[in-house]
Amino acid sequence: MFRNLSTFGLPLSGRPSELIELALSFGFDAMDIDLVDFQQQAETFGVPHARRLMVSARLKCGVFRLPVTLDADNATFNAELAALPKRLEFAQATEATRAVASIAAASDEHSFKDFFEQYRTRLDTIGGVLDPYGISLGLTITPESEARAEKTHQFIHTLEGLIGLLAVSHPRVGAVVDSWAMHITGEPLEMITKVPKGRIVEVRLSDAPRDVAAAELTHAQRLMPGETGVINSAALLTQAKNAGFDGPVTPWADRSTLAGRGRERIVKVAGDRLEAVWREAGLPIVPRWFTPVAKDAFGRPLNEEVFIGAE
């Protein structure tokens, strides 16, 4: 397993060079990339130029968001699918091997049965496209009841339900194991071991407030891991390790819970919290060697116009 920074999971903004230096300074081994932005930069400047900071920093690519909307109408889905192979070529150039996408928790248009079949067929198609590039897709669920409120038909919003979908999906399709989601749904950590072998794509860690019942939580209450100790991140990592997971572990929190903290403070706290979880779970911490991002005589990062990787 390795520690991954996502500027979507911990909403952050800044120049790529600045974000990379923060990731390195506070113990992260990897960062997510924005594949669409990377493609634009690579087409303009060339692939080697577009990924040079990531290479020099020796950061792994964590995950990228699949640029396909799984529950879109047929015209939109087919158009995004047609554009996918070209984009996957750029993903392969970054050495990315993991993508993520979300499943809708409910629908007004589709019954559970019809929605399940639509996802199954679309995921089978996507899996076939991903396979030649060696890329796996991790599916995320939306567990909060607010996502299903006033919808006509409920859909998959638990890990158990997701495992049921994986059972009939392409082997390239797997799961994102999310501590926040499992806390809300009340599923036991042992459920992680039921994910088909080798098909956990990412692990996400968060915490929850002490004074709110799990089933009543809203996304806006999602805290950084280690904030209250309500969610036992170390126990979840232990289960993931037992299940054979060796991929990115990413801290997640809602933007509103990070208000008043500067960017550097957010990344430092996240790095410290992950290190504490690593130690509690008995995982090895390998010291990193890195060269800080090069700067000019005025202290400005060089080549800061080059996109490197941040969702």
Image: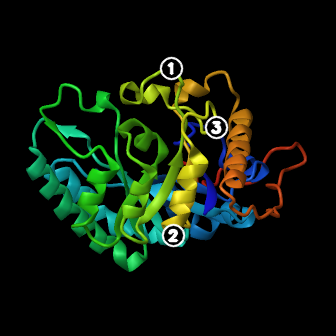
Residue at 46% of width from left, 22% of height from top?
Answer: 212
Visible residue check, residue 62: no
State the residue lying farthest toward the bottom. 132
Q: Return the residue nearer the eye: 232 or 130.
A: 232
- Of the image marks 3 and 2, the number of the one nearer the N terminus: 3
Badge 3 crowding class, 10 Å Cα cut-off, few under 14, some 14 to 19, many 20 or more, is many
Q: Is residue 76 above or below residue 138?
A: above
Q: Quadrant of the N terminus?
A: bottom right
| Residue 138: quarter of image | bottom left
Whole-Å distance between the Cαs marked 1 and 2? 34 Å
Q: Give the label, 3 or 1, closer to the camera.
A: 1
Circle 1 is placed at which residue position? 211
Badge 2 crowding class, 10 Å Cα cut-off, few under 14, some 14 to 19, many 20 or more, is some
Tell me where residue 129 appears, x and y as whole percent: 30, 72
Tell me where residue 146 appears, x and y as whole percent: 30, 27
Residue type, numbered disc 2: Gly
Q: In this view, does 144 lie above or below 167?
A: above
Residue at 74% of width from left, 44% of height from top?
Answer: 272
Q: In this view, does 208 lie above or below 31?
A: above
Q: Which mark is residue 226?
A: 3
Residue type, numbered disc 3: Gly
Residue type, numbered disc 1: Asp
Visible residue check, residue 13: yes
Residue at 74% of width from left, 46% of height from top?
Answer: 22
Circle 2 is placed at which residue position? 244
- Of the image marks 1 and 2, the number of the one nearer the N terminus: 1
| Residue 257: quarter of image | top right
In the rendered view, does 307 fall on the left or right side of 292?
left
- Of the image marks 3 and 1, the number of the one nearer the N terminus: 1
Q: Residue 146 carries which label?
A: none
